[in-house]
């Protein structure tokens, strides 16, 4: 990979062997969480530099207080989201689908605890500063005392604003509504849509790219897991499709008239590492410690794992200190598997096994996850920290159809698709019965008039438009019967 975006000023992305031009009318399948962090980081940096430029003589402690990420104005998030999407859709003519995580997290209890612990630590750091004026060590130097550190230090030490994800999601939904009613054919040429998943979105992001036989859909995010997703060769035969992973930090979209960036596949990585079988990358992730196996690998119990039994002793015999096997060693040993296990087909690739039942479960889940196998039988946890925030926006497919007007208010777990289908069915019945505007208004639109959820306003507004088009030629007793006033909050 080239340097990260923070150090790309003197680096030409096009010099990378993995650089590709992305033609107009391609599709970006974007991980919503990765997109949100990307927008948050860049929005904060804009705010950081703008504030310092506007207050060059302010006292250091006051500057630090104003630069706390918790005080980032949400307008910066809104502005950057709009700027980015407008550039992708209108300037580069790219279709965008944003996939958002659901509540269900399978086999990630350890990872969730680790992330929760990190957020807790950041919150305590913020509390200590606000209540006791105690700063992290990264803000203090021996020579100059307290300093204003670079923006990335603020982002590492302090928590993200609580409304970050909600602000970005709602900005995208508002843009989606605006584009659907745009009168400009140029603005309508590309699609923007958000999809709320039941489980983690990563597999959906990757699968959208993998299933596109035209190879014009890119999995866009900031997660190296996309490098190892792919069908197993035993189930896909001679399928040459791959997940086209385009890392967000290495996309050229902002200061260039042509879209391009680093695009890599699992095949690229396997060839670069001299691995005879692509699926050995999954085994490598198991041994290196991914989100599902890290807790077992960290315990360093070589006797329970065949790989460390076979190769750990060889490594230790050459190292009197018996240090942990390095990443280079793991990749090297896996690359030697071709002679022993054959032609590089999936069925003959080396497989990691263990005598520990929980570890073996994590290994099987890793393979099924990254190979798009059935993972429905694996245990899961609900992400409690995200549940309250996502309750209004998350969708599932298990909620019963809407039968009455009162059911409209119980849409917490109703899918966007199911909701749209049900309402469209009601509208169609009314159209066929030549229903009046008052009837439609009372049965469909009235329940939404005072609702505060933008998700409902979205459909409310769409249906309003549809029915006004249907009834525009019908005589009305007065003009008030012909139009239904939008709630002030929506306006």
Image (cartoon, helix red, strand yellow):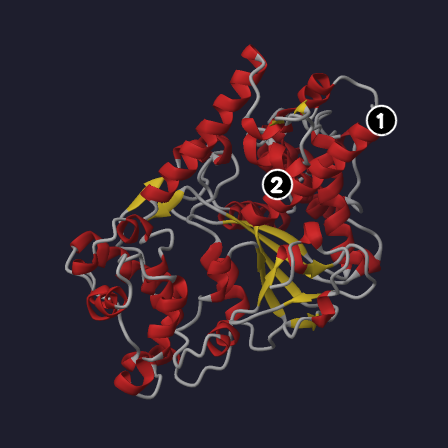
Left or right, 217 with reference to 232: right
Q: For residue 8, say whether it is visible.
A: yes
- Viewer-proximal residue among 172 and 257: 257
Rate crowding at label 2 as few (under 14), some (14 to 19) or many (20 or more) other CA atoms within 10 Å: many
**Image quarter (top left, top right, bottom left or bottom right) of the N terminus:** bottom right
Rate crowding at label 1 as few (under 14), some (14 to 19) or many (20 or more) other CA atoms within 10 Å: few
Q: Which residue is mark 2?
A: 169
Q: For residue 483, say whether it is visible.
A: no
User: Residue drawn 46% across and 74% down?
Assistant: 273
* SS state under label 1: helix
Locate residue 305, reporting x and y percent: 20, 62
Left or right, 152 with reference to 365: right
User: Residue drawn 65% across and 41% down?
Assistant: 41
Q: Residue 430 is drawn in which quadrant? A: top right
- Viewer-proximal residue among 363 and 124: 124
User: Residue drawn 64% across and 35% down?
Assistant: 167
Locate residue 299, reporting x and y percent: 25, 49
Locate residue 4, reporting x and y percent: 64, 54
* SS state under label 2: helix
- Relative height, residue 154 to residue 315 (above, below): above
- Relative height, residue 95 to residue 132 (above, below): below
- Relative height, residue 12 to residue 52 (above, below): below
User: Residue drawn 56% across and 36% down?
Assistant: 156
Q: Which mark is residue 54?
A: 1
- Viewer-proximal residue among 7 and 170: 7
- Viewer-proximal residue among 68 and 10: 10
State which tag comes first along the sequence, 1 or 2: 1
Q: Residue 354 is drawn in which quadrant? A: bottom left
């Amino acid at each position: 990979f080239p340097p990260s975006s923070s150090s790309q000023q003197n680096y030409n992305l096009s010099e990378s062997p993995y650089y590709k031009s992305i033609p107009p009318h391609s599709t970006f399948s974007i991980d919503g969480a990765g997109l949100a962090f990307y927008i948050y980081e860049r929005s904060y940096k804009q705010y950081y530099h703008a504030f310092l430029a506007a207050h060059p003589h302010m006292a250091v402690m006051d500057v630090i207080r104003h630069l706390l990420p918790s005080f980032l104005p949400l307008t910066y998030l809104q502005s950057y989201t709009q700027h980015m999407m407008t550039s992708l859709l209108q300037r580069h003519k790219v279709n965008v689908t944003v996939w958002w995580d659901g509540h269900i997290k399978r086999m990630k209890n350890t990872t969730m605890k680790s992330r929760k612990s990190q957020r807790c630590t950041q919150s305590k750091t913020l509390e200590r500063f606000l209540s006791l004026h105690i700063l992290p060590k990264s803000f203090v130097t021996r020579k100059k005392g307290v300093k204003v550190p670079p923006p990335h230090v603020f982002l590492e030490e302090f928590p993200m604003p609580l409304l970050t994800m909600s602000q970005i999601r709602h900005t995208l939904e508002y843009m989606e509504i605006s584009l659907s009613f745009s009168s400009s054919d140029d603005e309508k040429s590309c699609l923007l849509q958000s999809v709320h998943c039941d489980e983690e979105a990563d597999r959906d992001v990757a699968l959208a790219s993998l299933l596109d036989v035209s190879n014009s859909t890119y999995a866009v995010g900031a997660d190296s897991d996309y490098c190892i997703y792919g069908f197993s060769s035993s189930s896909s035969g001679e399928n040459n499709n791959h997940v086209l992973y385009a890392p967000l930090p290495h996309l050229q979209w902002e200061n260039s008239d042509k879209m391009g960036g680093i695009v890599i596949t699992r095949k690229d990585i396997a060839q670069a590492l001299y691995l005879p079988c692509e699926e050995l990358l999954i085994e490598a992730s198991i041994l290196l410690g991914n989100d599902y196996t890290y807790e077992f690998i960290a315990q360093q119990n070589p006797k329970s794992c065949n790989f460390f039994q076979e190769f750990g002793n060889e490594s230790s015999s050459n190292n009197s200190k018996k240090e942990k096997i390095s990443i280079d060693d793991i990749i090297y040993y896996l690359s030697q598997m071709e002679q022993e296990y054959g032609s590089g087909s999936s069925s003959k690739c080396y497989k990691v096994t263990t005598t520990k039942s929980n570890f073996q479960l994590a290994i099987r889940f890793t393979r099924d996850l990254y190979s798009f196998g059935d993972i429905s039988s694996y245990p899961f946890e609900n992400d409690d920290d995200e549940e309250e925030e996502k309750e209004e926006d998350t969708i599932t497919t298990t909620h019963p159809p809407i039968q009455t007007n009162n059911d409209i208010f119980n849409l917490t777990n109703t899918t966007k698709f199911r909701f749209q289908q049900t309402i469209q069915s009601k509208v169609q019945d009314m159209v066929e019965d030549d229903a009046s505007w008052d009837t439609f208004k009372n049965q469909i639109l009235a329940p939404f008039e005072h609702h505060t959820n933008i998700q409902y306003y979205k459909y409310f507004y769409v249906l309003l438009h549809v029915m006004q088009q249907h009834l525009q030629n019908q005589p009305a007793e007065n003009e008030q019967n012909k139009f239904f006033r939008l709630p002030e909050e929506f306006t």
